[in-house]
Amino acid sequence: MGWGVAAGSPAAVEGESSDGAGACARDELPHLEGLRAGAELWENHGFCVRASDGAHEFLLWIAFYILKGAPGGRFTVGDVRVDQAIAVHGEFPAGARSSMHDTPFTAAGVHWSEYRAPGELTCVLDGDGAVWQLAGRRHEGASPRWRLVGAAGPLTVDLDLEALAPVSWFDGFELIEGFEALARVRGTIETGGRTFSVEGVAQHEKVHTSVPIQRTDGAGWATSPVADRHIWHVGAGRELAFSVLANQPGERPGLANGQLVIAGRRLGFGRDSLRVEETEHWRDPRSGVEVPVGWRIEVEHEDGRLELGVAAYARAYYLWDYLRGSTSLLYWLLADARALWTPADGSGAVADSLLYAAHTNRPFLYWG
């Protein structure tokens, strides 16, 4: 397939503490030590994977969570560990990739009955990386390389990730601390008795907050056309890679953490540089909810202008109810995108087709 952004991978940052350019093994470890008495912790060690073998398309969300509640706090749980594995995949010829389909999907580790005891998750330093293990799956490594091995719901994965650029650190994004890293991904995915050799794009998210976020501003996404929600988009092709996590539209509209990687450079951008337009919607016959399935995204950077047209064609979703007084509806959308990068210096524009994942992230529904 020959997929990959034309760039050399960055060198790992050595030492035991992070700086603005990278992350080391200790940055991958949990934040349970030193948590003040009575504080809650939400921590995520997750990977969004968008990959293909040229015929079979995959979108996976593979994540370990630490949820540590406190009496009278905002969590519905006390102290649990979660192994999530969300997947939608299939064969979608060119004519089937221009519209949404009600395809099968799997969502494991999203219900309280699937949560696990704290002692079942182990996290240790091993050489130059950290190793998280839970429920027959390992997340190992540190920037610029990671590996995912084992059970991911009904799938079995053996995937290697290599960073495309230094990690992107969160700075003042809704009380969240941590980093994201865009990466190439290569390896195998086994499902339904078949093994697929795949490659594509991935993004590693290592984030935590000890101040859990719960909105109190009224009806959520399913009942209001203009309501607070997050989007998280990840994509890459031969020439460029792109990701953005942003609020759209609603509360805290100024928040965004975005990055574009082109020719080995990571260009970061914020909400002031970003314009997101939902161009198409689809009423899911299974959930009954209308969801965005098409986007036009523009990024104005001092180095140039990025234009993206995104079209989704399959989805997975789930409800997550770990917050007291509300629940969350989360959609993952298998998509493609067409991108055009126009440099500010007038040099040649770059057009690219991207493997793409679109996550409509954490719309909240309230009661009480």
Image (cartoon, helix red, strand yellow):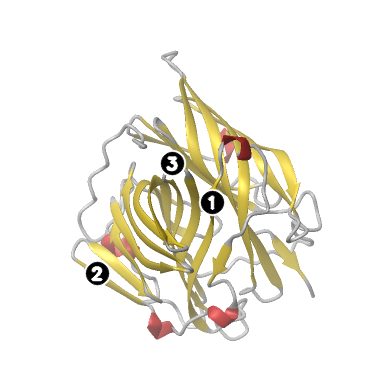
Residues marked 2 and 3 touching at CB (< 8 Å): no
Amino acid type of the residue that numbered disc 1 sits on in the rendered structure: Gly
Percent position of residue 143, x then y: 29, 53
Let me know if residue 258 appears in the view.
no
Please give the count of numbered marks on the rendered protein: 3
Earlier sequence position, callout 1 versus callout 2: 1
Percent position of residue 80, x then y: 49, 81
Q: Is residue 83 above or below residue 94?
A: below
- Residue 54: which disc? 3
Q: Which residue is mark 1?
A: 90
Q: Is residue 171 left or right of residue 337?
A: left
Distance Cα–Cα, label 2 vs label 3: 36 Å
Q: Nearer the viewer, residue 348 or 218?
A: 348
Q: Is residue 148 above or below residue 96?
A: below
Question: In the image as oriented, which residue stretches furthest toward the top?
Answer: 346
Q: Residue at x 33, y 41 (%)?
A: 165
Q: Is residue 344 above or below residue 277?
A: above
- Residue 125: which disc? 2
Earlier sequence position, callout 1 versus callout 3: 3
* Nearest-to-viewer mark from 1 and 2: 1
Amino acid type of the residue that numbered disc 2 sits on in the rendered structure: Leu
Q: SS at mark 2? A: strand
Q: SS at mark 1? A: strand
Let me know if residue 75 appears in the view.
yes
